[in-house]
Amino acid sequence: MTVRTQLVAFGCVLLLVGIWDFVGRLYVARDASLRTLHAQTALPLPPAESAGAIRRRMVGWLPAIAGSANEPPDPADATAWRLSLVGVFTQRGTAIAVVRASLPAGGPVEKLRVVEGDTIHAWTVAHVDAHGVILTHGADTQQLVLFRRSQPQPASAGPGPH
């Protein structure tokens, strides 16, 4: 047997092994039952836990964090939100304010469009005008302004122009 015939025989063996591998790995029969998907069954999820419940559980595991000063503020607490005025507009004679609400420790940021009488995280919008918004929460009052009026600069103590 010559080298050439040996190479041809070896090539044929490799071709047969390649076909066998294709049939074993990649070939999908035309049987329709192999192509049908079975219905997925939904698994029940446990109810979501609140941040306070998770923190209490963590304190049970790690008591050293119980007195942590870095506790996140409660989003349900009206005073926990930092409110700032983005803009004031008028539409058909109604003053509309855009207020940005965020938590000091990070987290969700909300941009809210409000008019007089609306509430923002337990703060009631008492008044909206071109200069700002007045919010009330019980006896507390908070004023959001677009621009702070600058204080007049005192006259210079040095010699003036002659």
Image (tube, rainbow, N blue to C red):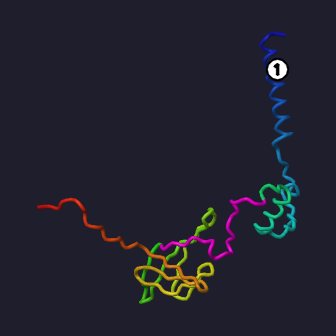
* Residue name at image x 84 percent, y 40 percent: 25
Q: Secondary structure at mark 1?
A: helix
- What x and y, as percent, mark residue 53? 81, 67
> Residue 160 appears in which quarter of the rendering?
bottom left
Q: Residue furthest top?
A: 2
Residue 34 on image: x %, y %:
87, 54
107 within the magenta span: no
Q: Is residue 160 above or below residue 93?
A: above
Q: Is residue 47 above or below residue 36?
A: below
The quarter of the picture where the C terminus appears is bottom left
Query: Which corner quadrant holds the N terminus?
Result: top right
As shown in the figure, which amino acid type bears the numbered disc 1? Phe
Magenta range is 66-85
Crowding near the residue tagged with mark 1, few <14, some 14–19, many ≥20 C-alpha atoms within 10 Å = few
- Magenta segment, principal secondary structure? loop
116 and 60: which is toward the camera: 60
Q: What residue would you read off at disc 1?
A: 10
